[in-house]
Image: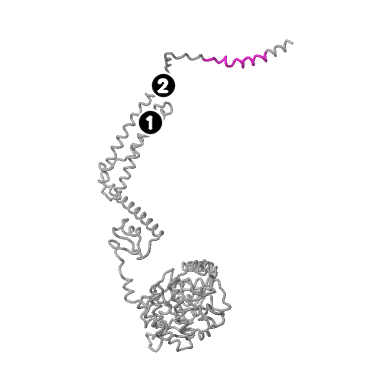
């Protein structure tokens, strides 16, 4: 640690003019407004400054590039909320992999794994330590994209944006289709590029704004997006329409944003860069932005703030002027995309916010509970789901297959939890019952069934008639079924939470079933007598029937084997003959 900073990295002085407010101790002095650090910056270009129009080429993201972009904000501890949103024409196929990698590195840094974060992002250990410290202090970073109508973009650029899973998309317009005096009709004019600013004299200011509004409104209504970027871009070089026309365009923008749920960006690059030396344009921009903020607040449209920085030194630049406009417009909550949703960041703690945070949670029983699944409700209520309690659903949203599967799993979990709770309650109640009321154990009939089955199994291999005697033995397995029935009855009793005395009644009724079924087992013993009688009958010779022919006598064994004896004697005679000779 050096100078209170980890790994010897010093804190840089502020690189932008802070918002000056009167100090508490000395009114003549000024102090830094802490709300400046809280204003989210939703518009930054990590791929750097733009080159001349003819030299612009797609630039791939790297995890190191993105990580260092956030590192500079952590080193200054401002802005606390920052999003990268590069231009669509700069996107490449490598960008989704780099974005996924840097998100993993940020998670590792947030968890305190400095070595893992540094290795994943390809940065030094000190860089990972600074980012880790910032994340633990509450700084948050998002990755989005600025999508526009640049004709140089890849045909599949939107697929690349979707693969990046951006937290938000800034919808903007940088090209207008005009009749060029040399290139002819249908030419794409980069009207905000200084290389082509002379065409304003050809097209005209009013026509330029008319084409711009038609293109922008069509993009908002038909194309995906979350935030409208730099609405006043046609006035970049001081080309403003008359006040009545501008207010009419502002109303059209507000209505389109209300219909599609877009937020509106107040771009501060016009204050610290484009209009830095033109006080008249600067004043015009401030008044137009203030009027737009008030209209957006009246209609419930979110306001976002972006520095449009192309270098880390411009992150959060010009926010002092915007903070003053926000105070004059009475806006306290700023839109910031994070984790794929449009969140609101409060600049100061008001009574409404404090009351909302201090409000008690809604009751669990008898009302709709938001944010709790049925399994969680069951765990909070001793394994029983309160009647009439259901999680809140988003109005107008269809239930997806994933939600249905999740609800099924929750119902099964609740049923299991309720069964276990009922079983524990019934078990505790059963311990207090007397031996008279306790139900007899059904498995006691199992040995009788086994004993009766053994003789029947032996007689089955000797005589077919003995198989019939096995039927009672097979029926002797009924006690097992009776035991299963008693178990099911006990489970049903447990779920119904009936007392142990009531649960004993179905067990008593099941006991006689065991005795009645066990009686046929005793009849299996005469199987031996039947087998003995059958043996005696088989041993006695049966008398031939009248008129039947007598069976032919069987030939004796010597007759069958006579040729074999002759062949055995023949060699002996030959030997004797040879001996005589």
The kind of secondary structure element at disc 2 is helix
Position of the C terminus, as image quadrant, is: top right
Q: Position of residue 522 (x, y in %)?
A: 33, 30
What is the total number of numbered labels drawn onto the structure image?
2
Q: Is residue 459 visible?
A: yes
Q: Nearer the viewer, residue 349 or 435?
A: 349
Whether residue 569 is in magenta: the answer is: yes
Spatial separation of the CA atoms under disc 2 and disc 1: 19 Å
Q: Position of residue 248 (x, y in %)?
A: 39, 81
Q: Which residue is mark 2?
A: 535
Residue 182 location, quadrant: bottom right
From the viewer's perspective, is residue 402 above or below residue 268?
A: above
Q: Position of residue 444 (x, y in %)?
A: 33, 38
On the picture, is 168 further left or further right than 500?
right
Q: Nearer the viewer, residue 518 or 409?
A: 409
Residue 560 location, quadrant: top right
On the picture, is 19 further left or further right than 55?
left
Toward the top, the furthest residue is: 580
The kind of secondary structure element at disc 1 is helix
Within 10 Å of disc 2 (Cα), the crowding (few <14, some 14-19, many 20+) is few
Q: Which mark is residue 108?
A: none
Q: Which residues are magenta?
A: 554-572
From the viewer's perspective, is residue 398 above or below residue 52?
A: above
Within 10 Å of disc 1 (Cα), the crowding (few <14, some 14-19, many 20+) is many
Residue 403 location, quadrant: bottom left
Toward the right, the furthest residue is: 581
Whether residue 412 is in magenta: the answer is: no
Q: Position of residue 428 (x, y in %)?
A: 29, 49
On the picture, is 68 further left or further right than 247?
right
- N-term-proximal mark, 2 vs 1: 1
Q: Are marks 2 and 1 in contact (CB under 8 Å)?
A: no
Q: Which residue is mark 1?
A: 470
């Amino acid at each position: 640690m050096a100078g209170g900073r980890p790994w010897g990295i010093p804190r840089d002085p502020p690189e932008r003019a802070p918002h000056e407010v009167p100090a508490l101790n000395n009114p003549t002095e000024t102090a830094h407004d802490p709300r400046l650090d809280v204003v989210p910056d939703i518009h930054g270009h990590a791929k750097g400054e733009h080159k001349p129009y003819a030299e612009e080429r797609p630039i791939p993201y790297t995890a190191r590039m993105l990580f260092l972009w956030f590192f500079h904000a952590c080193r200054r501890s401002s802005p606390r909320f920052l999003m990268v949103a590069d231009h669509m024409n700069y996107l490449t196929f490598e960008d989704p992999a780099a974005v996924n990698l840097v998100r993993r590195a940020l998670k590792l840094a947030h968890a305190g794994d400095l070595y893992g974060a540094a290795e994943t992002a390809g940065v030094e250990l000190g860089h990972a330590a600074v980012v880790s410290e910032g994340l633990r202090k509450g700084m948050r970073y998002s990755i989005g994209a600025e999508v526009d109508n640049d004709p140089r973009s890849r045909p599949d650029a939107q697929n690349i944006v979707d693969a990046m899973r951006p937290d938000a998309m800034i919808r903007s317009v940088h090209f207008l289709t005009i009749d060029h005096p040399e290139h002819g009709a249908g030419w794409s004019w980069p009207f905000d590029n200084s290389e082509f600013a002379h065409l304003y004299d050809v097209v005209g200011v009013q026509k330029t704004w008319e084409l711009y509004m038609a293109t922008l409104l069509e993009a908002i209504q038909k194309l995906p997006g979350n935030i409208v970027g730099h609405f006043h871009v046609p006035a970049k070089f001081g080309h403003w329409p008359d006040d009545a026309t501008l207010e009419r365009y502002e109303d059209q923008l507000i209505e389109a944003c209300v219909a599609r749920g877009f937020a509106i960006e107040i771009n501060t690059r016009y204050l610290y860069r484009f209009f830095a030396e033109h006080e008249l344009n600067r004043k015009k921009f401030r008044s137009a932005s203030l009027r737009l903020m008030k209209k957006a607040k009246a209609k419930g449209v979110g306001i976002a703030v972006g520095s449009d920085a192309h270098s880390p030194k411009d992150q959060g630049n010009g926010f002092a002027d915007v903070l003053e406009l926000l105070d004059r417009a009475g806006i306290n909550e700023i839109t910031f995309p994070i984790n794929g949703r449009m969140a609101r960041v409060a600049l100061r703690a008001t009574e409404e916010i404090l009351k909302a945070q201090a409000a008690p949670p809604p009751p669990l029983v008898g009302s709709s509970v938001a944010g709790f699944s049925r399994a969680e409700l069951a765990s909070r209520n001793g394994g029983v789901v309160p009647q009439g309690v259901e999680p809140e659903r988003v109005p107008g949203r269809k239930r997806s297959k994933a939600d249905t599967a999740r609800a099924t799993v929750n119902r099964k979990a609740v049923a299991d939890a309720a069964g276990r709770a009922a079983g524990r309650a019934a078990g505790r109640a059963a311990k207090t019952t007397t031996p008279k009321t306790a139900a007899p154990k059904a498995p006691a009939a199992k040995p009788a069934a086994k004993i009766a089955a053994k003789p029947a199994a032996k007689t089955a291999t000797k005589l077919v008639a003995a198989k019939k005697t096995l039927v009672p033995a097979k029926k002797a397995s009924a006690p097992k079924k009776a035991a299963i029935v008693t178990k099911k009855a006990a489970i049903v009793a447990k779920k119904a939470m009936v007392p142990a005395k009531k649960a004993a009644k179905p067990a008593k009724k099941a006991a006689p079933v065991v005795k009645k079924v066990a009686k046929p087992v005793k009849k299996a013993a005469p199987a031996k007598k039947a087998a003995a009688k059958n043996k005696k009958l088989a041993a006695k010779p049966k008398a031939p029937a009248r008129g039947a022919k007598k069976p032919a006598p069987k030939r004796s064994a010597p007759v069958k084997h006579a040729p074999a004896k002759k062949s055995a004697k023949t060699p002996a005679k030959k030997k004797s003959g040879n001996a005589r000779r």
